[in-house]
């Protein structure tokens, strides 16, 4: 383990994939700052870290530009740089037909999944361009739903398409500054609040089945691997899913 691989920010770090990734990366030598709206959830992540792990919490709302700016200003004040950002914060809306969702639900998912990632990426790029040595890595949490949507998931699918576009754009725009960007597309992770499947999941043929899932720790291990790569190397896109998940065959 490295003495200190660098300074990492993980949004949505109070539960699920965010929490698992914070613990995996801090165990691998990173100083990790978890961000989220719920202070109690962030405190739970900090409490689960061992005595040798460096995990800090900063309460922040990724949909609020001033809150995001305060998050990054706090990290820069404490540590002087930002080496890694995991745009993990996200949400879903009920799986009902698009015409049955109200405008507030649509606005909320777009603001959380898309605007939040844009605001955090902007703040990270500002920091990464200004720091010495410059550069850093951004990893976006996408979804297999972006290219194989489930029934009644138009808002979620649309926002994850947007994340794919953001990943590709940052890959190009960040190149002159040593800023690299990758994306992890997750299929069926336990503890991921964006994909509730407790009652089974409707399939395109009208059936409902209980789909296999993998643990958030397996997702965290992949993000940790992407994070530790030298900036000369990148994983632009990777899919991590349960081996027998019926992704291929549904679209």
Image: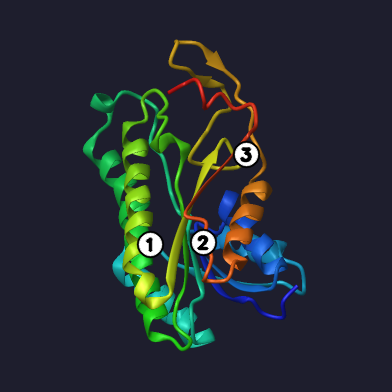
Q: Position of residue 136 (x, y in %)?
A: 47, 73
- Earlier in the chain: of badge 2 and badge 3, it is 3
* Front position in the image: 199 or 160: 160
- The residue indicated by pointer 1 is 171
Q: Residue at x 31, y 67 (%)?
A: 173
Q: Any mark on residue 234, and which?
A: 2
- The residue indicated by pointer 3 is 190
Instruction: Please report contact status of discs 1 and 2: CB closer than 8 Å, yes or no.
Output: yes
* Front position in the image: 190 or 37: 190
Q: Secondary structure at mark 3?
A: loop
State the image quarter where residue 153 is shown: top left
Q: Position of residue 150 (x, y in %)?
A: 42, 26
Q: Position of residue 144 (x, y in %)?
A: 47, 37
State the image quarter where residue 50 is shown: bottom right
Q: Secondary structure at mark 2?
A: loop
Q: Residue at x 35, y 75 (%)?
A: 176
Tell me if residue 31 comes above or below residue 11 in the rendering.
below
Q: Residue at x 32, y 36 (%)?
A: 155
């Amino acid at each position: 383990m490295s003495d200190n691989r660098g300074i990492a920010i993980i949004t949505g770090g109070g539960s699920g994939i965010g929490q698992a990734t914070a613990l995996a990366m801090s165990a691998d030598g990173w100083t990790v700052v978890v961000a989220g709206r719920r202070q109690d959830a962030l405190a739970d992540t900090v409490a689960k870290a061992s005595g040798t792990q460096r995990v800090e919490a900063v309460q922040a709302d990724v949909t609020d530009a001033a809150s995001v700016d305060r998050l990054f200003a706090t990290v820069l004040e404490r540590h002087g740089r930002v080496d890694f950002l995991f745009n993990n914060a996200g949400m879903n809306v009920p799986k009902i037909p698009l015409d049955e969702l109200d405008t507030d639900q649509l606005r909320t998912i777009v603001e959380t999944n898309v605007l939040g990632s844009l605001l955090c990426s902007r703040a990270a790029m500002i920091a990464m361009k200004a720091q010495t040595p410059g550069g850093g890595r951004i990893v976006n949490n996408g979804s297999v739903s972006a290219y194989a949507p489930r029934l009644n998931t138009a808002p979620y699918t649309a926002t994850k398409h947007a994340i794919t576009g953001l990943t590709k754009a940052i890959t190009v725009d960040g190149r002159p500054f040593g800023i690299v960007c990758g994306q992890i597309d997750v299929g069926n992770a336990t503890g991921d609040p964006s994909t509730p499947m407790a009652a089974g999941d409707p399939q395109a043929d009208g059936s409902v089945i209980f789909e296999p899932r993998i643990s958030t720790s397996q997702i965290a291990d992949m993000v940790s691997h992407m994070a530790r790569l030298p900036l000369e190397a990148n994983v632009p896109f990777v899919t991590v899913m349960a081996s027998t998940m019926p992704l291929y065959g549904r679209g």
